[in-house]
Image: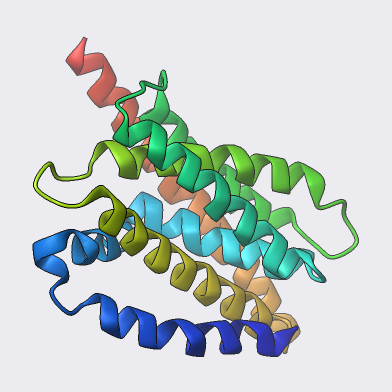
Amino acid sequence: MRNFGVTMLLLLLPVAAWAHVGGSDTGLFNGLMHPVFGLDHLLAMVSVGVVSSQLGGQNIWRVPVAFVSTMVAGGVLGILGVALPFAELAITASVVALGTAIVLAHRLMSPWPITCMVLLFGVLHGHGHGIEIPKAVSPVLYTLGFLISTSVLHILGVLIGELATLQAWLSKGLRLAGGAVIVSGVAFLLRALSATVVGQ
């Protein structure tokens, strides 16, 4: 399983390299960059990979695939302009929840509560991407871009999680990092709540 993340990363690298060619004109490059420059999205997507590694076994691929699958569905909803109440607040709350999952997750626990949580968060993050698609770009290519970027971030999270299994102090450090993700998520959530109150 430890070789899975490396293998997937190597498989995706040629696609990512191709995606940058002409991407700024089509939406592909915009889609690739959007998850990277949105810190809440970035933390959430890396956290999904980390948690999947902590759960171990088939969850290493099952949890990220669950996220990506429902993210596509959420992206379609966003592209179609379907509104999800409090979606932005829920996205920021997902960072808190995933940080908490990093602190608590281990290989002996049932993976289904976290998997169900990831399914929901995939819809929310996909919707957030979908509604932010620039009008001048191709929705299909933009979606492909953020799917590639998200997959790479998941793989990065898996590699971080697998690395943390090598030494006890790395595992403890990973859980401390989960705490830092929680703090960041709380900050995002407070900012989003403040913006919501000001906007009313």
x and y percent of residue 159 in the render? 59, 81
Query: Considering the image in quadrants, where does the N terminus appear?
Result: bottom right
- Whether 166 is drawn above or below 82: the answer is below
Q: Position of residue 122 (x, y in %)?
A: 52, 45
Q: Which quadrant of the figure has residue 35?
A: bottom left
Q: Residue furthest top?
A: 200
Identify which residue, 171 or 15, lies in the foreground.
15
Q: Residue at x 54, y 65 (%)?
A: 177
Q: Position of residue 167 (x, y in %)?
A: 72, 88
Q: How many marks?
A: 0
x 26%, y 48%: residue: 139
Across and down, in percent, residue 25 comes to 9, 64
Q: For the C terminus, give its image quadrant.
A: top left
Residue 76 shows up from this direction:
yes
Q: Nearer the viewer, residue 160 or 177?
A: 160
In this rendering, would 89 be left or right of 192? right
The reply to whether residue 94 is visible in this rendering is no
Say which of 84 and 82 sits in front.
82
Tell me which residue sits at (52%, 49%) in the image. Answer: 182
Within the image, what quadrant is residue 12 found in? bottom left
Classify residue 190 as left or right of residue 9: left
Depth check: 67 or 160 in front?
A: 67
Judged from this view, the residue extending furthest toward the right is 108
Q: How is the image coloured?
A: rainbow
- Residue at left offset 27%, top offset 59%: 141
